[in-house]
Amino acid sequence: MFTGIVTAIGTIESSEQRGDLRVRIAAPLDPERIDIGASIACSGVCLTVVARGGAKGDAWFDVDVSGETVSRTVPGMWETGRRLNLEPSLRLGDELGGHIVTGHVDSVGEVRTFQKKGDSWLVAIRARAEMAPFIAAKGSITVDGVSLTVNDVRDLSDGTCDFALNIIPHTAEVTTLGSLEEGARVNLEIDVLARYLKRMQGLAASSR
Protein backbone atom coordinates (compact mmCIF):
# COMPACT_ATOMS: atom_id res chain seq x y z
CA MET A 1 0.00 0.00 0.00
CA PHE A 2 1.23 3.50 -0.90
CA THR A 3 0.12 7.13 -0.67
CA GLY A 4 1.38 8.61 -3.94
CA ILE A 5 3.97 10.78 -2.15
CA VAL A 6 7.24 10.30 -4.03
CA THR A 7 10.39 10.11 -1.90
CA ALA A 8 13.09 9.88 -4.59
CA ILE A 9 13.72 9.72 -8.32
CA GLY A 10 15.54 6.63 -9.57
CA THR A 11 17.18 5.86 -12.91
CA ILE A 12 17.18 2.51 -14.71
CA GLU A 13 20.81 1.35 -14.98
CA SER A 14 20.13 -1.89 -16.82
CA SER A 15 17.24 -3.90 -18.21
CA GLU A 16 17.81 -7.55 -19.06
CA GLN A 17 15.26 -9.95 -20.53
CA ARG A 18 15.29 -13.26 -18.68
CA GLY A 19 12.11 -15.23 -17.97
CA ASP A 20 10.83 -11.82 -16.88
CA LEU A 21 12.53 -8.48 -17.28
CA ARG A 22 15.24 -7.93 -14.63
CA VAL A 23 15.62 -4.20 -14.04
CA ARG A 24 18.29 -2.48 -11.93
CA ILE A 25 17.37 0.94 -10.57
CA ALA A 26 19.87 3.41 -9.12
CA ALA A 27 18.50 5.74 -6.45
CA PRO A 28 19.70 8.18 -3.74
CA LEU A 29 18.57 5.83 -0.97
CA ASP A 30 20.19 3.88 1.88
CA PRO A 31 20.57 0.22 0.84
CA GLU A 32 20.42 -0.82 4.50
CA ARG A 33 16.83 0.46 4.57
CA ILE A 34 15.82 -1.50 1.46
CA ASP A 35 14.72 -4.98 2.47
CA ILE A 36 14.81 -7.94 0.11
CA GLY A 37 11.16 -8.73 -0.62
CA ALA A 38 10.05 -5.18 0.13
CA SER A 39 7.61 -3.39 -2.17
CA ILE A 40 8.58 -0.17 -3.94
CA ALA A 41 6.29 1.77 -6.26
CA CYS A 42 8.19 2.66 -9.44
CA SER A 43 6.27 5.39 -11.31
CA GLY A 44 3.08 3.90 -9.99
CA VAL A 45 3.96 0.21 -10.35
CA CYS A 46 4.31 -1.94 -7.21
CA LEU A 47 7.43 -4.11 -7.60
CA THR A 48 9.33 -6.45 -5.28
CA VAL A 49 13.00 -5.91 -4.43
CA VAL A 50 15.00 -9.06 -5.28
CA ALA A 51 18.53 -7.67 -4.74
CA ARG A 52 20.11 -4.48 -3.49
CA GLY A 53 23.48 -2.86 -2.88
CA GLY A 54 25.56 0.29 -3.14
CA ALA A 55 26.20 2.90 -0.49
CA LYS A 56 24.03 5.35 1.42
CA GLY A 57 22.85 8.01 -1.02
CA ASP A 58 24.07 5.95 -3.97
CA ALA A 59 22.09 2.71 -3.78
CA TRP A 60 20.70 0.30 -6.35
CA PHE A 61 18.03 -2.36 -6.25
CA ASP A 62 16.79 -5.02 -8.68
CA VAL A 63 13.19 -5.86 -9.52
CA ASP A 64 11.56 -8.40 -11.84
CA VAL A 65 8.98 -6.94 -14.24
CA SER A 66 6.52 -9.44 -15.72
CA GLY A 67 5.25 -9.37 -19.28
CA GLU A 68 1.80 -8.44 -17.94
CA THR A 69 3.25 -5.38 -16.20
CA VAL A 70 5.19 -4.33 -19.31
CA SER A 71 2.03 -4.59 -21.42
CA ARG A 72 -0.01 -2.41 -19.04
CA THR A 73 2.48 0.40 -18.48
CA VAL A 74 3.88 3.23 -20.58
CA PRO A 75 5.71 1.99 -23.70
CA GLY A 76 9.49 2.25 -23.23
CA MET A 77 9.13 2.73 -19.49
CA TRP A 78 11.57 -0.09 -18.63
CA GLU A 79 14.42 0.99 -20.91
CA THR A 80 17.88 1.95 -19.63
CA GLY A 81 18.12 5.61 -18.66
CA ARG A 82 14.45 6.03 -17.82
CA ARG A 83 13.76 8.09 -14.69
CA LEU A 84 11.20 6.71 -12.24
CA ASN A 85 9.28 8.12 -9.29
CA LEU A 86 9.98 5.96 -6.23
CA GLU A 87 7.93 5.39 -3.09
CA PRO A 88 8.55 2.63 -0.53
CA SER A 89 5.44 0.92 0.82
CA LEU A 90 3.72 2.30 3.90
CA ARG A 91 4.86 1.27 7.35
CA LEU A 92 2.51 1.11 10.34
CA GLY A 93 2.25 4.62 11.77
CA ASP A 94 3.36 6.46 8.60
CA GLU A 95 1.52 9.64 7.66
CA LEU A 96 -1.09 9.19 4.92
CA GLY A 97 -0.09 12.32 3.02
CA GLY A 98 -1.73 11.61 -0.34
CA HIS A 99 -4.47 9.04 -0.89
CA ILE A 100 -4.63 5.24 -0.80
CA VAL A 101 -2.66 3.87 -3.75
CA THR A 102 -2.29 0.17 -4.56
CA GLY A 103 0.50 0.36 -7.15
CA HIS A 104 -1.61 -1.37 -9.81
CA VAL A 105 -1.72 0.61 -13.07
CA ASP A 106 -5.22 0.75 -14.56
CA SER A 107 -4.44 2.42 -17.86
CA VAL A 108 -2.06 4.65 -19.80
CA GLY A 109 -3.04 8.27 -20.45
CA GLU A 110 -1.70 10.86 -22.88
CA VAL A 111 -0.67 14.40 -21.99
CA ARG A 112 -2.69 16.77 -24.18
CA THR A 113 -1.49 20.10 -22.78
CA PHE A 114 1.34 21.13 -20.47
CA GLN A 115 1.30 24.87 -19.88
CA LYS A 116 2.84 27.22 -17.34
CA LYS A 117 0.25 29.00 -15.20
CA GLY A 118 1.74 31.32 -12.61
CA ASP A 119 4.45 29.35 -10.83
CA SER A 120 2.68 26.05 -11.48
CA TRP A 121 1.91 23.90 -14.51
CA LEU A 122 -1.56 23.21 -15.89
CA VAL A 123 -1.73 19.68 -17.30
CA ALA A 124 -4.55 18.04 -19.26
CA ILE A 125 -4.45 14.26 -19.69
CA ARG A 126 -6.67 12.17 -21.93
CA ALA A 127 -7.98 9.00 -20.34
CA ARG A 128 -9.37 6.02 -22.23
CA ALA A 129 -13.10 5.31 -22.28
CA GLU A 130 -12.86 2.54 -19.68
CA MET A 131 -11.20 4.98 -17.26
CA ALA A 132 -13.50 7.98 -17.77
CA PRO A 133 -16.34 6.91 -15.40
CA PHE A 134 -13.88 6.70 -12.49
CA ILE A 135 -12.51 10.26 -12.81
CA ALA A 136 -14.30 13.11 -11.05
CA ALA A 137 -13.55 16.77 -10.34
CA LYS A 138 -11.90 17.19 -6.91
CA GLY A 139 -11.31 13.44 -6.75
CA SER A 140 -7.89 11.80 -6.50
CA ILE A 141 -5.86 10.11 -9.22
CA THR A 142 -2.32 8.73 -9.41
CA VAL A 143 -0.16 9.86 -12.35
CA ASP A 144 3.17 8.05 -12.69
CA GLY A 145 2.94 7.22 -8.99
CA VAL A 146 2.13 10.77 -7.85
CA SER A 147 -1.07 11.49 -5.90
CA LEU A 148 -2.89 14.43 -7.50
CA THR A 149 -6.27 16.15 -7.30
CA VAL A 150 -8.41 16.39 -10.43
CA ASN A 151 -9.39 20.01 -11.09
CA ASP A 152 -11.85 19.46 -13.91
CA VAL A 153 -13.14 16.74 -16.26
CA ARG A 154 -14.35 17.15 -19.84
CA ASP A 155 -16.17 14.16 -21.34
CA LEU A 156 -15.72 13.57 -25.07
CA SER A 157 -18.11 12.07 -27.62
CA ASP A 158 -16.06 8.87 -28.06
CA GLY A 159 -16.31 8.03 -24.36
CA THR A 160 -12.82 9.24 -23.45
CA CYS A 161 -12.26 12.26 -21.23
CA ASP A 162 -9.71 14.99 -20.65
CA PHE A 163 -8.97 15.80 -17.02
CA ALA A 164 -7.02 18.78 -15.73
CA LEU A 165 -4.40 18.83 -12.98
CA ASN A 166 -2.23 21.48 -11.36
CA ILE A 167 1.44 20.64 -10.78
CA ILE A 168 2.92 22.92 -8.12
CA PRO A 169 6.64 23.84 -8.27
CA HIS A 170 7.58 21.45 -5.43
CA THR A 171 5.94 18.47 -7.15
CA ALA A 172 7.55 19.40 -10.47
CA GLU A 173 10.96 19.51 -8.78
CA VAL A 174 10.86 16.29 -6.73
CA THR A 175 9.12 14.05 -9.32
CA THR A 176 9.43 13.36 -13.03
CA LEU A 177 6.23 15.31 -13.72
CA GLY A 178 8.19 18.51 -14.18
CA SER A 179 9.69 17.12 -17.39
CA LEU A 180 6.40 16.11 -19.01
CA GLU A 181 5.56 17.39 -22.46
CA GLU A 182 2.61 17.21 -24.82
CA GLY A 183 2.18 13.72 -26.25
CA ALA A 184 3.92 12.00 -23.34
CA ARG A 185 2.32 8.82 -21.96
CA VAL A 186 1.72 8.38 -18.23
CA ASN A 187 0.63 5.54 -15.94
CA LEU A 188 -2.78 6.10 -14.34
CA GLU A 189 -4.33 4.51 -11.28
CA ILE A 190 -7.86 5.41 -10.30
CA ASP A 191 -8.88 6.13 -6.71
CA VAL A 192 -9.66 2.82 -4.98
CA LEU A 193 -12.87 4.33 -3.56
CA ALA A 194 -14.08 5.16 -7.08
CA ARG A 195 -13.38 1.56 -8.08
CA TYR A 196 -15.62 0.16 -5.34
CA LEU A 197 -18.38 2.72 -5.94
CA LYS A 198 -18.47 1.81 -9.65
CA ARG A 199 -18.73 -1.89 -8.74
CA MET A 200 -21.56 -1.19 -6.29
CA GLN A 201 -23.43 0.83 -8.93
CA GLY A 202 -23.09 -2.02 -11.41
CA LEU A 203 -24.42 -4.58 -8.92
CA ALA A 204 -27.34 -2.34 -7.97
CA ALA A 205 -28.30 -1.84 -11.62
CA SER A 206 -28.14 -5.57 -12.42
CA SER A 207 -30.41 -6.47 -9.50
CA ARG A 208 -33.26 -4.28 -10.68
Image (tube, rainbow, N blue to C red):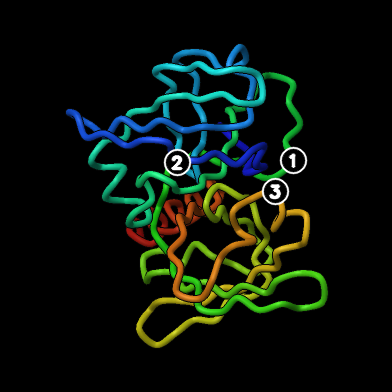
Task: Determine crowd level at label 1: few under 14, some 14-19, many 20+ residues with C-alpha closer than 10 A.
Answer: few
| Residue 193 shown left or right of residue 48 in the figure | right
Numbered circle sitting on residue 174: 3
Q: Is residue 171 above or below residue 28?
A: below
Work out which quarter of the rendered image holds the C terminus and state it: bottom left
Q: Secondary structure at mark 2?
A: strand
Label 2: which residue? 45
Q: Position of residue 91 (x, y in %)?
A: 65, 21
Q: CA distance from mark 3 to mark 1?
A: 15 Å
Amino acid carrying mark 2 in the image: Val
Kindly indicate the quadrant of the structure image that contains residue 122: bottom right
Which mark is nearer the camera, 2 or 1? 2
Question: Among all residues in the image, which is located at the extreme bottom?
Answer: 157
Residue at (61%, 50%) from the top-left corner? Answer: 146
Q: Earlier in the sequence, mark 3 or mark 1?
A: 1
Q: Which mark is residue 206?
A: none
Instruction: Give the image quarter of residue 99.
Output: top right
Which quadrant is the N terminus positioned in? Answer: top right
Q: Which mark is residue 97?
A: 1
Which residue is rendered at x = 41% and y = 25% of the image? 62
Identify which residue is drawn at 35% across, 47% down: 79
In the image as oriented, which residue stretches furthest toward the right? 118
Q: CA distance from mark 2 to mark 1?
A: 18 Å
Depth check: give the residue in front, 195 or 119. 119
Closer to viewer: mark 2 or mark 3: 3
Q: Amino acid at mark 1?
A: Gly
Q: Residues within 10 Å of mark 2 (few under 14, many from 20)?
A: many
